[in-house]
Image (cartoon, grey):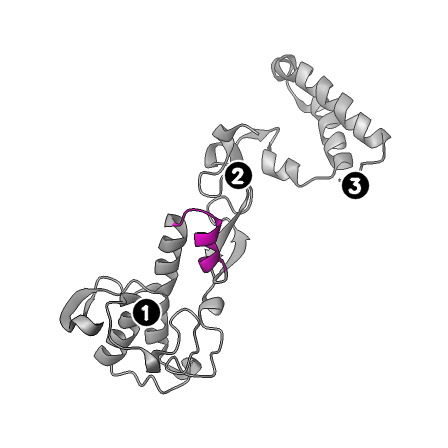
Amino acid sequence: NSPDGMCPDCNGLGRKLTVDPERIVTEPTISLLDGASPWWGKLRQSKRTGNWMRGEVLALAEHWKVDLELPWNQLPQKFRDAVLYGAGDEKFSFTYEMGESGRSGTIVRPVYGAVNHLTRLFNQSHGKSSMQAFLKFMTEQPCSTCQGERLCADARFVTVNGTRYPEVATMTVAQVQQWVAGLSEQLTAEQHAIASEILTELELRLRAMLKVGLHYL
């Protein structure tokens, strides 16, 4: 349980909350204008305010001549990918008006996409209440860095007699007991001298667990 060995991206949990595109667009058979996405809302009612997260959808559609009257699932794949994941380094112009003040202007910037916006906002949020607003767009997935094995790269690839620790961690108590018992016969004299106290302690603990019927854990 040393923090030195944990995966730095998931803090040793093996799983991470990640933005789920299917939660961004929940009604793919209707248009974005009519509310296909709870993230952007009904864009038909959206004015060109300073909200770039909505505005980038309108800016992209205008630039690429995309008909937003079409249902989400009939929109060009390039457009759907861009509004979800961004459009690279290409920059787009978005004209806005600031309500009663009458101020207007033009923003020129890349399109970052809803997934990247949500990830950034979630990571910057503090406290349960502020995080709650973004959780409905997220699902828990195996950590892409450690592949669910919970450890940092150095710890994941240390082996004992050719077996990695994450592989041992997936075994049942009974399987680990058999593996530990077999190590004594496979280690060299020097390795056995180093590991003998650890192996003895492991054997005692594993046998105690087997004795009380926890072999299946």
Asked whether residue 146 is in view, the answer is yes
Check residue 133 for magenta coloring.
yes
Quadrant location, the C terminus: top right
Q: Which residue is mark 1?
A: 82
Cα–Cα gap, marks 3 and 1 = 48 Å
Q: Which residues are magenta?
A: 125-135
- Where residue 195 appears, x then y in whole percent? 64, 17
Q: Which residue is mark 3?
A: 216
Dot 2 or dot 1: first in sequence order is 2
- Judge depth for marks 3 and 2 and give the one in front: 2
Q: Given contact means CB atoms under 8 Å apart, are the residues at marks 2 and 1 in contact?
A: no
Q: Is residue 91 left or right of residue 70?
A: left
The prevailing secondary structure element of the residues shown in magenta is helix
Q: Is residue 91 left or right of residue 173?
A: left
Give me the residue at 14% from left, 72% from top.
104
Q: Which residue is mark 2?
A: 12
Check residue 179 for magenta coloring.
no
Cα–Cα gap, marks 3 and 2 = 24 Å
Quadrant location, the N terminus: top right
Give me the residue at 71% from left, 23% from top.
202
Dot 3 or dot 1: first in sequence order is 1
Q: Amino acid at mark 3?
A: Tyr
- Where residue 84 appears, x then y in whole percent? 37, 67
Q: Residues within 10 Å of mark 2 (few under 14, many from 20)?
A: many
Q: Secondary structure at mark 3?
A: loop
- Where residue 27 appears, x then y in whole percent? 48, 78
- Where residue 107 appears, x then y in whole percent? 17, 66
Residue 188 or 116: which is nearer the viewer? 116
Q: Secondary structure at mark 2?
A: loop
Q: Amino acid at mark 2?
A: Gly
